[in-house]
Amino acid sequence: MKKKNKKQNLPETVVGLDIGTTKIAAIIGQKDNEGKIRVLGYGKGISTGVQNGLVFNVKKTVEGIRFAIDSAEKRSELNISEVFVGVAGRHIRSKEFKYTFLRLNGKYNTIQQEEIDKAIENLHNISVNAAETIITVIPQRYVIDEKRVITDPVGELGEQIEGYFQIVTSDKYEIEKIIKSVQDSGLTIKGITLEPIASSLSCLSEEEKREGVAMVDIGGGTSDLAIYHGDNLVYTKVIPIGGQVITRDIAQICHITEEQAEQIKKIYGSCVPENSNRTNMITIPHFGGQPVSISEENLAKIIQARVKRDIADKVKQAIEESGYKDNLYRGIVLTGGGSLLHHIKELFTYVTQLQVRLAIPDIGFSSFPNELRNPVFSTSLGLLKYGIQGEKLPNTELEEKEMHANDAGDSKNGQNENKTPTQVFTIVNAAKNFFGNLIESSS
């Protein structure tokens, strides 16, 4: 790689790196004078070492990362050494957990933030499968003295507090492979977060998060769900099906290559057979045999069957299980490459009976190349925003010794004295105890 003048690398320059199933994207940016984000460069490489969000070939993943990084460096004329990385995949699990604690003199003493912090800290240390680790604990609601149900108990009076939390776990080995792939690419991980959280940053407005919204990021290998209400993240889930499976369905049924299936899916595919051109026959060349023909209507039936059963229905089920279905006043926001399927908005509206909009990742950006105005880049742009606006996010300033592989660790750990319960233990707090230690041990 051609060396560049490191003086060009401004302190506030940040890189978001999305290691996806079908593509690896790196985006460089910095905050402008108005507090918005200006994109300086970007690069995209083909991902051949990842399946369903899981790294199965480190060497191929490193090659994809290096291609994306090199492209971004050439466009921006900057050197890249540190990145903010996303994590997703079918190894992410979540479940609800009830935690109860009693308070002496609770009728006279108000609940303090320290008590909630301690409860969440205790939850982070509960026993899980030996091969897994807890990566975040998301407070959902509290019941005080078996009467009042609230989201923020601080300042309330009560003797018995029942907290309901979402415990998100990850496979240790899968996280280690992501870290190794990045470090073998010659990069340092400066921060790491759940990909649905990153995508939310680039696709959801503050009004949507406050009034209640479910974001669904349909990628190549997974579909990531993140539910917000009252400005807080209240529920996440990774559905292990994405656009790549739809492509494989088409390829297998039509006896064509996946490359051909992907092409006709993008051009002619629809999620609603009734909206397709029933009289149009698609002819696909078949090497060594007769061309294959399929009607647009039958192609749509193949696509609808998979999208409805394994994505839309699963999203509906997850929303119902979250307990926030009646609080989603802003409905569902779809993003990711899978959201580009024709009529997917109509299918989700029909299945969930909620309002649905398609999102382009453009929230909080001032200078923005047209090539990036595409749902495919929602996660990578969100990771960029996550890194640049870290000081505005809850508990994002990690100790240097925990997030830098070769740092001695003398930096201070930033604290936010006005944390709300939902902000107390975000993915970044979990990174202090897990990701940071893994990064250190693998270096």
Image: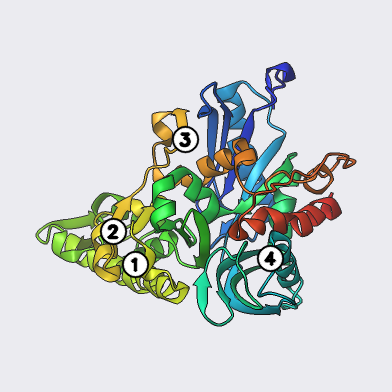
Which class describes the residues within 10 Å of circle 3: few (<14), some (14-19), or many (20+)? Answer: some
- Depth check, mark 2 against mark 3: the one in front is 3
Q: Earlier in the sequence, mark 2 or mark 4?
A: 4
Residue 269, which numbered label? none
- Depth check, mark 4 against mark 3: the one in front is 4
Q: Please say whether residue 291 is visible from this viewpoint.
A: no
Q: Which residue is mark 4?
A: 116
Q: Earlier in the sequence, mark 2 or mark 3?
A: 2
- Depth check, mark 1 against mark 3: the one in front is 3
Residue 307, which numbered label? 1
C-alpha distance separating marks 1 and 3: 31 Å
Q: Which residue is mark 3?
A: 364
Q: Which residue occupies 63% across, 49% down? A: 394
Is residue 170 shown above or below 128? above
Query: As shown in the figure, which amino acid type bears the numbered disc 1?
Result: Val
C-alpha distance separating marks 2 and 4: 41 Å
Counting from the top left corner in percent of width and height, residue 162 is at 61, 78
Q: Secondary structure at mark 1?
A: helix
- Farthest-out residue, front: 108
Q: Earlier in the sequence, mark 4 or mark 3?
A: 4
Q: Secondary structure at mark 4?
A: helix
Query: As shown in the figure, which amino acid type bears the numbered disc 3?
Result: Gly
Q: Quadrant of residue 63?
A: top right
